[in-house]
Image (tube, coloured by chain):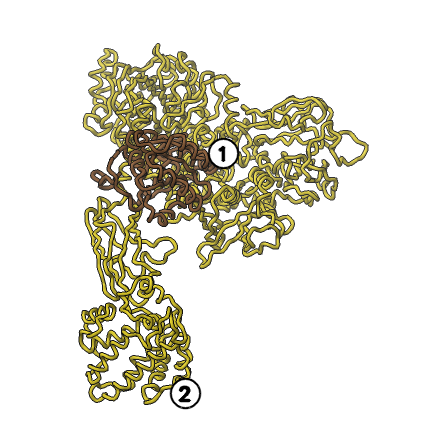
Chain colours: A brown, B yellow
Amino acid sequence: MAKQYDVLFRLLLIGDSGVGKTCLLCRFTDNEFHPSHISTIGVDFKMKTIEVDGIKVRIQIWDTAGQERYQTITKQYYRRAQGIFLVYDISSERSYQHIMKWASDVDEYAPDGVQKILIGNKADEEQKRQVGRDQGLQLAKEYGMDFYETSACTNLNIKESFTRLTELVLQAHKKELDGLRTYAADELNLAELEEEERKPDGAENSPKTCWC
Amino acid sequence: MAPAILVAEEHCHPHVLITSPCHWLAAELLEGPVEASCPRLKMAGLPHRVSPVPGLLLLCLLAPRFSPRSPLAAAELELVNATSSVPSMNETADSPLTCHSFQCAGERCYQDLAYANDTVACHNASFCELHRVTSANYTARCSSACGGVNGTEMCMANGSMRASPCALECCSSPLCLQLNATAYGDLPPTTTPAPTTTTTTTKAPPRNGKVCATFSCRGDGCFKGKKPAGRCIVGFNFCEMKKTGSSYVAGCSKACKTGKPVCAGGVATTCYQECCPAGPKASCLKLDGHVHVNGAGRRALAPILQLLAGGAVLILHYCVLAALQDNGAGGVGSSRPPREHPRAGASPALVLCGNGAAGKDLARRRQLGRRMDQSVAIQETLAEGETCLIAVQGVLVGVESVESRLLGLVRSHGEHAIFIYTHRRMAITAEDVCLETVLPIAEGFAVEEVTPDSDLRVIGSDVTVQIRSGDVGLLVRLPFGSQTRTFLQDVGQCCPARVMPVENANILGVWMGMELAQPPPVTAWVASPCQHAVWSPGLEKPPGVVGSEDIKQNEKNLAVNQSWSHDGVDKAALRQSKPKTEVTSEMVRSSTMMVSDKASLLSVKKFELRDTIVKSQLVQKEDSYTSIQNFRFFVGTYNVNGQSPRGSLQPWLSHDIEPPDIYCVGFQELDLSKEAFFFNDTPKEEEWFKAVTDSLHPGAKYAKVKLIRLVGIMLLLYVKADLAPNISEVEAETVGTGIMGRMGNKGGVAIRFKFHNTGVCVVNSHLAAHTEEYERRNQDFKDICSRMQFCQADPSLPPLTINKHDVILWLGDLNYRIEELDMEKVKKLVEEKAFLALYQHDQLKRQMDEKAVFEGFTEGEISFQPTYKYDTGCDDWDTSEKCRAPAWCDRILWKGKNITQLSYRSHMALKISDHKPVSSMFEIGAKVVNEELYRKAFEEIVRSLDKMENANIPSVTLSQREFFFKDVKYMQLQVEKLTIRNGQVPCQFEFISKPDEDTYCKEWLIANPCKGFLLPDSEMTVELEMFVNKSTATNLNSGEDKLEDILVLHLDRGKDYFLSVTGNYLPSCFGSPIHTLCYMRDPIQDMSAESIRELTLMPLLMNGEAFRGEKPLDIPKELWMMVDHLYRNASQQEDLFQQPGLRSEFEHIRDCLDKGMHDTLLGSNHSVAEALLLFLESLPEPVICYEFYALCLESASNYVLGRQIISRLPECHKNVFKYLMAFLRELLKNSGKNHLDTNILASIFGGLLLHPPPGQPKPDITEKRKAQQFIHQFLLREDNSP
């Protein structure tokens, strides 16, 4: 019986309000999409287990409020992340412009060596497009990030982008992971979760909490 | 358990494998002094004469029978015999010895580093030898005997080199050849008597700057005072002096070899007199005639006595333990290697802590990592002979302030310690550090990781460890990264508690060696012997049989990556590719050093909860990813009556045309000798194993999976070589049911394994004899069923029993007879082949019909004549005195699904025993895993688990996310309600403070309750209470503060919700400074926010200067309003200032004052009086300014001084003070009516007018008295105008 997971990472979604962060998360974890927009006011997270390079990775994905007035608080969550999605909406020039601000916040608050990836979401809304793909690419290049245009609605590049960021985080932590592969006991130390406190009881009819 | 492993060879009693002190003593009792018959024992460096310990012996004799492991242990150790007749102290016993292997030409060409990597795995050779063919031709190779081949001898003799072919070096640990001419004394002929240098070799090897005394000499004490020092070649970091007979050879060495014994009395072969880490200046060899081996010398000097004493302790321990243990449940526990070893045994591995490979490794790392390392600074503080191997900077946890420390791992003369230093920032030199404490790495030392329970552990977080040494315990947080990891690993390697005693290290090493293609298991440390399930006995393998070590413990059968090769060369290559066992056992050790035993078990448990769910769901879904495939199982049983095999067993084993896929071959009465009974050791095992192996079906190649034997009951399991990867989780156990219900003369042995995904258990039993003893047989069966328990790979799972298998095959001499028929009748029925009629009288059939035994088992129809009892050598029924009646003693039964018996027969052609062998061919459907479907099922489960987990993240719905408090007034409570409705998961909520803030919300807000617990589907109302008091009013008036806040509602282990709270504050004279109000000619609420802000923030001016062209009022109009109101209406009011006012009236008065409805203050006198007091209380600067507070108290009884102070107050404050005093004196005039007196007023107003400055403690009773006294003076004086 193979182990269920080897390692746990935290990824964070940031970007302006309404760019579709919550939808990206819902699509990735639950494969669901809700077109209506409800602002995330707070910080939410979901778990997902994926396999990258034969390593079972449990990722905890944090979805943050995008509204400006909460930013002083949400910034404080950056330091716990190993990977960050910077998300803008291709139909909103403004959200694209704000990426610079988000990126500088990341520089300031996230730990060194945090992995970043740029996401242009709502790629299905071609007719409303305000930000060209090349612009996205250009910005990503400036920041040395990978870039994906995604659509939570059509499920475009969702898995790819999440997997990619996870890969990047894995690579960044390669040293530790090599140790982890060699020294079995370390795995225990590195990947500990709180299952024991959270017994899976009453799981059948739990509420769906995906607002988009 | 055993501190010593004695191996007997040709001259010893055949196959006396002495595996424990008990065996050992017992052997001596029976055989006489061990040494006498075992000349080689000396070579192993072991004591050669043992005094039996009276009283213990009987226990010892019996103990092995009681221990379920002892038969196995014997089988395991057989390997030692095959691979290395002198087992080294720290190499694993199973793996073949690896030796350098090359030929080279040229003087001392073996020194060429190019050859150092040429190695070979040895077969049937116990030594590595460097052989000199001529003075310019050398061969390095495996050797079965040192210098024994071709009669060659060691080259160095009498201090001179032999000219004829000879052995330069011979040693017995992996890659042990030093390949160092200096060490061999193989030096070029020179006129100077002392060979001081080796640089005359054609190719000078690179030096490492270290020196060792280098010489060879002959005769006891010849080395004393030898001075010549040789420079060491790179890689030779130790100095050693070896002794062979009375010859001594000193020189540089690659490592302090542990393969050879340390010199001590009675050690005749090459041994170590000294070995130490080489230094740069002088040789570390002491040459004083004492043994020094890396600090272990003292212990090594008197090994015999210590070993004996330790042995005795162990014997007692072992025997008592064993005797107490049951074969069954207790046996499982006992079968694990004991973790905490009694140190008294002076187990060699303990002695050698920090030597050899580990030491070398550390040294290398030290060189590599030195540059960035603060160990340099530490090193400078150390004494000579002390080395800082590695250092790491950490933070002491648990002290009040954060204190950084530098931790250095220091080695000193073979001992290790952690030195802890205080230090300046980045320590560069010795001056930067200061030694605080030293924690020796000795007994009682432990490093244990402490998991913060508050937070998730993720990659990238710091490591907090608890370091304990003796009574000292330190909690240190080490930074995340490789330095910390390396540090902890190195500490772990130096830690004696982690160095496993030989036996265990071997076991783990073996197991690791087999696991080469797979990541090491999670539970490496917890690994018990039950995980070394697949075992190579190391016997000569007949062609066609692949060593069972090639069968992997393939979890999930995923690892099908071996190339099956059957010739020796490929196999050698295969072996060579394996990691060196030295390395692997080290890995095992280092992998465990982080976690203490207890903690490790705990984490395994924690960690595996999710795994367990996945596992159980995978089992549930098994049908979805497996399909049934049929395989042919041959099952055979043969009671051989103590005979040795004669002739081929093919008529029995290869009867069918088609080769079976799996062979299960069982024997009973393999050996009837007392040795077999007492020591569970018999040469027959090998004979029959060979005989079976030779007679396996020639149509296929087979791999031996397992051999298990209990005295005479032996079971062999073979699998077709190409199917071997499908076998996993092999376990074998034995249960004795013989004499005293425990001995091994009767009983059963069993092998369980997983074939594809089907659990198979094969049992071979020999049940109680004699016709009338059928109930005893029934009982034996039950005993075997209940006491046969197999460990599981996952230690948290309970042991498996026979019944927990999909397929059970039971064979053996079950000994059930034919009853109620006399001999002649039986023989007649046999002759008539009326087997069915005869079968009706079969005890087993009858007992099974009565459900007294073998419940749920099936037996095929018997169509062969009874297999017992014949005269040996022919097919005649027993003609002996006893004249036993024929019976079907030998039977094969099965239990489980998808099993079809293809044949069931006896084999009359075999005549060596009084039984005939029986065989049965089965077609058994195994659950074969479809990898793709398995993967799908697996992923599906993981997905659903994720989903379940996400659904179980606590989540609530909130009635409202934004709260607006409209028109908030001074001291007027406003409440908004928030309803938290819980989802399906019980949750704990709490408002948490934001970073950089001490509280979860601003001062003017309170959430009630601010934390709580919610059951599923329940809800709770939280009241958000807005209340502006004097401490917040001023800043709200000025606009410096706004009614704006974001609350973070945190769910434990769940998400965070942000609640936004806003409101507008109506400015008030309450909380405004006196001077501000003096400049306000309009009611405060009629003024613009901007002017309020400006006036509130303006500095307090000394004199009533004009501000923006306006002269200030003498006193605030609001104060005048209230005082005037009281003066006019309340001079004679009873109990004025002593009765409380009404809250509603206060609010009205406040609004009047703030909005300027001046003409009248509605409300009772008491309410106005209270408003006045509140007004004075809420002044940000009291009437007598803070700066004068202390002065006032000092001059409390000096009216003149007091007046001077008042005269120094700012104008408006001075006015207010005088005004109030005048008013109070007026009131006192009416004291007859209003019942006021100076004391009452002084006590009320003393505290209001005189406040200690903010930040000072509240006034105590003395201060209060003084404040009252101060006011009191002014109340008494009529005229106090300055």
Same chain assignment for discs 2 and 1: yes
Q: Which mark is residue B1040?
A: none
Left or right, residue A99 beside residue B94: left
Where in the figure is residue B119, as x and y percent of width and height?
Answer: 58, 25
Q: What kind of residue is marked 1?
A: Thr
Residue B323 position within the rendered picture, expressed as x and y whole percent measured from the top left: 39, 41
- The residue tagged 1 is B584
Label 2 to label 1: alpha-carbon separation: 93 Å
Report if the CB atoms under discs 2 and 1 are less than 8 Å apart.
no
Give residue B1219's position: percent from left, percent from top. 31, 81
Side (left or right) of B351 relative to B992: right
Seen from the viewer's position, the closer of residues B488 and B424 is B424
Instruction: Classify residue B287 as left or right of residue B770.
Output: right
Quarter placement of the C terminus of chain B = bottom left
Q: Is residue B52 visible?
A: no
Q: Quadrant of residue B199?
A: top right
Find the residue positioned furthest to the right: B191
Q: Residue at x 39, y 21 (%)?
A: B724
Residue B657, compared with residue B1000, is above or below; it is above
Task: Please say if B158 is above or below B1092.
Answer: above
Pointer 2 chain: B
Left or right: B380 as drawn, with respect to B1036: right
* Residue A182 on image: x %, y %: 46, 35
Residue that extends furthest to the top in the rendered view of this protein? B657
Foreground residue among B515 and A195: A195
Q: Quadrant of residue B1184?
A: bottom left
First of labels 2, 1 by sequence position: 1
Element assignment for label 1: helix
Instruction: Give the letter of the chain under mark 1.
Output: B
Q: Which residue is mark 2?
A: B1200
Front-lying residue, B1122 or B980: B1122
Relative to A13, is B1246 above or below?
Answer: below
